[in-house]
Image: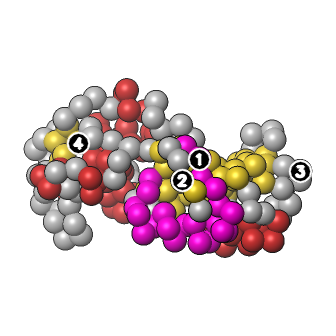
Amino acid sequence: MRMDKDYFDASLGLAFSLKAFERYRKSGLLQAELHHVPGIRGQCTGYLQLIEGKITSCYVEDKNGQRYPLGIDILVRVDAERGPFEWKLTTQPAPPSSTPPTNQPYQKGQLSSVPRIIAPLEPEMGRLTGWTAKQKYMLAMVYEAVDGRKTIEDIQREVPLSPNNTEEALRILVALKVLIVV
């Protein structure tokens, strides 16, 4: 396995490589040109969104730009049977674990923590290539709910997302270094 800034050689297989990404808590958009994906005609592009080594979304996009959600097990199987494919990793913002302790996102059960804005979100949105408009909208919605007074629990009640989605958005916003949680 070879990793450069934006190139990842998955010749040892995607399953093995994903375990390495999880161990080293890599974040980014992993993508490769694929063929013989069940249910998709012709070549397509596979995408895996990683946040701290965890897969947060997995889909393929056909040559017409149509997206199809896909289980990671199918992508791993296609890679094992038809690959390995050349996966490219576009790095995303550093995970929260690389920030000072005061910038750490809250842990489960610390819903009384208060997020605070430390930078504008707009310039950071350009770094989210490969993210859907819906994902960017969800981040913006949570960001706009932060006023430096509301607790995480308050924000979870206010934003029309599930508490888990709101929590994930807050964690991503901390990773983008536009929020801190105190």
- The circle drawn on residue 179 is 4
Question: CA–CA distance between discs 2 and 3?
Answer: 28 Å
Does dot 3 land on a helix, a strand or a loop?
loop
Distance CA(mark 2)–CA(mark 4): 29 Å
Which label's residue is closer to the chain start, 4 or 1? 1
Residue 110 lies in what quarter of the image?
Answer: bottom left
Q: Mark 3 touching mark 1, by CB under 8 A?
A: no
Q: Nearer the viewer, mark 2 or mark 3?
A: 2
Quadrant assignment for the N terminus? bottom right
Quarter of the view holding residue 2: bottom right
Q: Which residue does the image show at 80% across and 39% down from the upper left?
A: 64
Residue 3's disc is 2
Q: Closest to the observer: 38 or 94?
A: 94
Residue underneath mark 3: 42
Tell me if mark 2 has few (under 14), some (14-19) or many (20+) residues whose alpha carbon lies within 10 angstroms of its own.
Answer: few
Give the magenta part as a residue range.
Answer: 6-27
Whether residues under marks 2 and 3 lie with C-beta atoms below 8 angstroms apart, the answer is: no
Percent position of residue 56, x then y: 50, 59
Of the image marks 3 and 1, the number of the one nearer the N terminus = 1
Q: Indicate which label's residue lies in the foreground, 4 or 1.
A: 1
Amino acid at the residue labelled 3 = Gly
Give the mark nearer the N terminus: 4 vs 3.
3
Disc 1 marks which residue? 7
